[in-house]
Image (cartoon, helix red, strand yellow):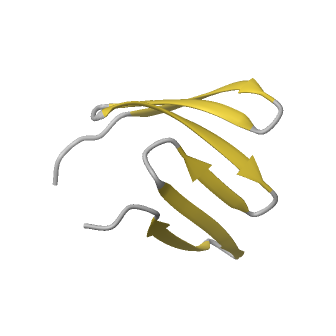
Amino acid sequence: MGFSYRKRIKIGNGTFLNISKSGVSVSQKVGKTTINSRGKITVNLGKGITYRTSLRKK
């Protein structure tokens, strides 16, 4: 198991600057849905359960 680092800084109303080992991204939270600049969508389904998908095709 490796180590990871993530830092989330609020820069506006529902907008965050995310800093991690793999780089920097920006995310926008709308209700239970979060969309980030890397093309990932995360939906919080409640009680610690989330669904994550990608906008980009492989």
Q: Residue at x 28, y 35 (%)?
A: 22
Q: Residue at x 35, y 34 (%)?
A: 5
Residue 24 in the image: state x and y as whole percent: 41, 28
Please tell me in which quadrant of the rendered image residue 57 appears: bottom left
Residue 37 in the image: state x and y as whole percent: 50, 41
Compare residues 56 and 28 and report the one nearer the observer.
56
Residue 19 in the image: state x and y as whole percent: 44, 28
Quadrant containing the N terminus in the rendered view: bottom left
Residue furthest out toward the front: 57
Please tell me in which quadrant of the rendered image residue 28 appears: top right
Quadrant containing the C terminus in the rendered view: bottom left
Residue 6 in the image: state x and y as whole percent: 43, 35
Q: Is residue 46 above or below residue 6?
A: below
Decide if residue 28 is on the left or right side of residue 42: right
Please tell me in which quadrant of the rendered image residue 13 appears: top right
Q: Is residue 4 above or below residue 46?
A: above
Compare residues 42 and 38 and report the one nearer the observer.
38
Residue furthest out toward the left: 1
Decide if residue 27 is on the left or right side of residue 37: right
